Image: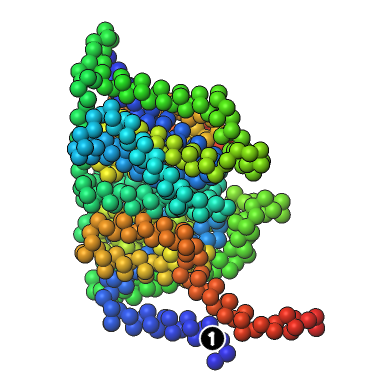
């Protein structure tokens, strides 16, 4: 086996891993504040990709524009979803949140399947990122390098905002003790809405990044979200850096499996989840509940 | 009559026996299979408080097993269904053993992920026929005697098996085991402090629920004479959740009512609206969760109780100590 195949597969694994990281990060932050597992996360990722595709087709928005517009559009949709629907579930068993967002995911998937069919459409790689460079050990496609860098940057930015800024400190306070935080004069309901919006905007951002690599199709989100659930179970939702490391690591392992045992690549993450449940039921970075 | 409940059950059984001569039997058999599936699922969520998002793995997996043994090894239908149930029991034990380590939201995610494992196996294993599934499954002869290719005979076979399944679930709910499950759902910490081995109870409930789902899946494979990827897809897991939710979580008859509702809806809509079925199901989820959490049977029971209370308004005076 030559090193080109190995390294490009590893790179693709890392890219997948960075998507796992962004999505599980969003899930964890939303779960922390809203106590809801957002099943619609995959659907919103898919809608982010469609935003880029349709924005280009209907309004001529470039890739770089889409990278900004899609998260804003989907974030606004998130505000509507949170204000109109999720807020009403406050105080109920959080299984209801899962069921409601599952319904939303079905609606989104069904609508897009009705509009665009199931086969998927290609999104062109932006002009400036076509081609690649030879870095000695391998030929590095520019776009893939950019995706890896852009998604890692966003992951680290999220980590920085939450762990190292006053805003993040308030967010963490509201996660731990919502009522006490509210009593100290911080507007928790607005924070909840904003958190949901930012969480789903992250998913849309990942969707735009993914559009030129994979086909843009209505089921791209649901296939991904189930894997991301397994990633969340493996990593636990306790730590931001933990989610990033778990996501990247699992993406790498999946990439390697694709190379050496292709028929197992679809299931390797689920198998790892089973093993982690046996050894450390709370997850690698989770706190025991 | 002394026992109105017995009369009602008798009327229900008579109606079910007469039904295939009035209504299309295949439709009825589909409803019965899904009613059994949803009832088995409800055992877990309604009485154990465990939301499994992976029951398609048992239903669909058992359909594959039943279809394969009946077609390839010439099993009789009752042995085929038993083989499916045995598969579901083993898988249920395995999944349950892993999943009961976590509760609540994690339980749902774990079961969903494990079911996806079964989906990919069904896609890739040599005997499952990939995208095609297993087609042309013979219904065979019940005990080698009764030819089930006749729809009416098949209906009564399905009715008998489902009846036994309903009875088993009913007995389980009203047994000391069922009470212990309810106690765990209501207050797990207290159940632990009372000395119940909570994990073992959950696991047993999971295996039971999976096994009965497997029976339903095996029957479904025989009725339609095929097993496909649709049966193991996560949409199927979602569908059974919706049936139970719309009928009423934790009610005895709710899941069956929910199954009847959803299957009729699908049959009525499928040719008219096509892919909108998914959208409609999604809206039903949203509406049920927001406005209708008790489900059809739950709302009906609540309405009946409130009327009952109104009729007995002077009750506090009567309730004086004797």
Image quadrant in which you'd find residue A218:
top left
Pick the residue in front: A127 or A265: A127
The answer to whether residue A69 is left or right of residue A191 is left
Residue B136 drawn above or below residue A224: below
Which residue is disc 1 drawn over? B4
Pick the residue in front: A19 or B75: A19
At which x and y percent is residue A282?
56, 36
Please tell me which residue is depicted at 51% across the width and 57% down the height of the picture: B45
- Judging from the image, what secondary structure is the residue with disc 1 in? helix
Pick the residue in front: B132 or A72: A72
Image quadrant where one finds the N terminus of chain A: top left
Q: Looking at the image, can residue B242 be seen?
A: no
Image quadrant where one finds the C terminus of chain A: top right
Q: Chain of mark 1?
A: B
At which x and y percent is residue B88?
42, 54
Q: Looking at the image, can residue B283 be seen?
A: yes
Residue B296 drawn above or below residue B187: below
Please tell me which residue is depicted at 27% across the width and 33% down the height of the picture: A211
At which x and y percent is residue B8?
48, 83
At which x and y percent is residue A142?
26, 18
Residue B9 drawn above or below residue B79: below
């Amino acid at each position: 086996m030559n090193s080109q195949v190995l390294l490009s597969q590893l790179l693709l694994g890392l890219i997948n891993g960075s998507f796992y990281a962004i999505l599980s990060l969003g899930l964890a932050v939303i779960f922390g504040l809203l106590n809801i597992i957002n099943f619609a996360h995959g659907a919103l990722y898919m809608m982010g990709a469609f935003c880029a595709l349709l924005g280009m087709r209907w309004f001529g928005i470039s890739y770089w524009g889409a990278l900004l517009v899609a998260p804003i559009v989907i974030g606004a949709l998130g505000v509507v979803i949170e204000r109109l629907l999720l807020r009403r579930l406050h105080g109920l068993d959080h299984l209801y949140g899962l069921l409601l967002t599952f319904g939303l995911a079905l609606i989104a998937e069904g609508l897009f399947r009705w509009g665009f069919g199931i086969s998927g459409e290609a999104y062109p790689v932006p002009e400036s990122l076509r081609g690649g460079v030879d870095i000695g050990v391998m030929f590095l496609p520019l776009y893939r390098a950019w995706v890896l860098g852009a998604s890692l940057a966003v992951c680290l930015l999220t980590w920085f905002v939450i762990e190292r800024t006053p805003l993040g400190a308030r967010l963490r306070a509201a996660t731990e003790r919502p009522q006490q935080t509210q009593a100290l004069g911080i507007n928790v309901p607005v924070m909840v809405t904003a958190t949901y919006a930012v969480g789903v905007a992250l998913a849309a951002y990942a969707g735009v990044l993914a559009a030129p690599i994979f086909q843009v199709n209505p089921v791209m989100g649901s296939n991904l979200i189930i894997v991301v659930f397994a990633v969340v179970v493996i990593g636990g939702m306790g730590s931001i850096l933990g989610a990033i490391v778990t996501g990247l690591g699992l993406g790498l392992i999946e990439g390697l499996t694709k190379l050496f045992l292709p028929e197992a690549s679809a299931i390797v993450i689920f198998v790892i989840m089973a093993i982690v449940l046996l050894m450390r039921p709370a997850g690698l970075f989770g706190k025991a509940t | 009559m002394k026992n109105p409940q017995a009369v009602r059950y008798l009327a229900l059984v008579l109606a079910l026996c007469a039904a295939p001569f009035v209504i299309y039997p295949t439709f009825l058999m589909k409803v019965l299979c899904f009613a059994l599936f949803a009832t088995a699922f409800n055992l877990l969520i309604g009485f154990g408080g465990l939301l499994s998002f992976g029951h398609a793995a048992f239903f669909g997996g058992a359909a594959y097993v039943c279809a394969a043994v009946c077609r390839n090894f010439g099993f009789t239908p009752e042995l085929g269904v038993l083989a499916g149930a045995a598969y579901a029991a083993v898988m249920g034990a395995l999944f349950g053993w892993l999943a009961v380590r976590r509760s609540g939201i994690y339980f749902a995610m774990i079961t969903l992920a494990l079911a996806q494992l079964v989906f990919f196996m069904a896609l890739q294993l040599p005997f499952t026929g990939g995208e095609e599934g297993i087609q042309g499954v013979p219904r065979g002869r019940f005990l080698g005697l009764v030819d089930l290719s006749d729809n009416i005979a098949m209906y009564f076979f399905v009715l008998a098996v489902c009846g036994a399944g309903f009875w088993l679930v009913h007995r389980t709910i009203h047994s000391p085991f069922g009470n212990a499950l309810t106690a765990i759902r209501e207050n797990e910490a207290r159940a632990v402090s009372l000395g119940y081995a909570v994990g073992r109870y959950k696991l047993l409930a999971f295996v039971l629920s999976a096994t009965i789902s497997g029976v339903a899946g095996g029957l479904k494979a025989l009725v339609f004479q095929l097993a496909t990827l649709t049966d193991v897809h996560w949409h199927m897991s979602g569908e059974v959740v919706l049936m139970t939710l719309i009928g009423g979580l934790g009610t005895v008859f709710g899941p069956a009512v929910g199954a009847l509702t959803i299957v009729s809806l699908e049959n009525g809509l499928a040719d008219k609206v096509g892919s909108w079925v998914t959208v409609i199901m999604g809206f039903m989820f949203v509406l049920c969760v927001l406005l209708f959490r008790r489900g059809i049977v739950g709302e009906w029971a609540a309405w009946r109780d409130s009327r009952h209370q109104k009729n007995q308004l002077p009750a506090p005076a009567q309730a004086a100590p004797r």
